[in-house]
Image (cartoon, rainbow, N blue to C red):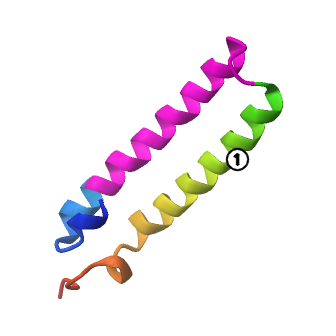
């Protein structure tokens, strides 16, 4: 998404893709915990970090203009 900062619609599209991937990561973490690939403590730590990334992406989606290379009029 970072390289697509010239046009707000394209940037938002890429941020939306990233947000979807972040949600999928949360599901994968649940699966990994349930199958015993990671401990409950590891799951909690990684899920917390994943949620933080989701919050950052959400904030960028709501206000993309500070991140654009050439702000839209």
In percent of the image, x 19 and y 61: which residue is there?
10
Tell me where residue 63 sits by quadrant: bottom left
Dividing the picture into quadrants, the one containing residue 31 is top right
| Residue occupying the far top of the picture | 35
Q: Nearer the viewer, residue 39 or 18?
A: 39
Question: Quick check: is 32 in the magenta stretch?
Answer: yes
Query: Chief secondary structure of the magenta span?
Result: helix
The residue at 37%/83% (across/down) is 66
Relative to 18, say whether 32 is above or below.
above
Residue extending farthest to the front is 37
Give me the residue at 76% from left, 34% from top.
Answer: 42
The N terminus lies in quadrant:
bottom left
Q: Position of residue 14 (x, y in %)?
A: 28, 54
Q: Which residue is mark 1?
A: 48
User: Is 34 colored magenta in this rendering?
Assistant: yes
Where is the C terminus found, in terms of image quarters?
A: bottom left
Q: Which residues are magenta?
A: 14-38
Side (left or right) of 24 relative to 26:
left
Against 52, residue 8 (above or below) is below
- Indicate whether 30 appears above or below 51: above
**For this view, does 67 lie left or right of residue 47?**
left
Residue 59, position as x, y percentages in the image: 49, 67
């Amino acid at each position: 998404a970072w390289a697509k900062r010239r046009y707000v619609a394209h940037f938002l599209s890429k941020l939306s893709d990233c947000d979807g991937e972040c949600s999928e990561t949360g599901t994968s973490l649940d699966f990994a915990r349930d199958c015993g690939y990671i401990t409950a403590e590891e799951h909690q730590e990684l899920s917390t970090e994943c949620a933080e990334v989701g919050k950052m992406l959400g904030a960028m989606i709501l206000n993309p203009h500070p991140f654009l290379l050439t702000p839209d009029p």
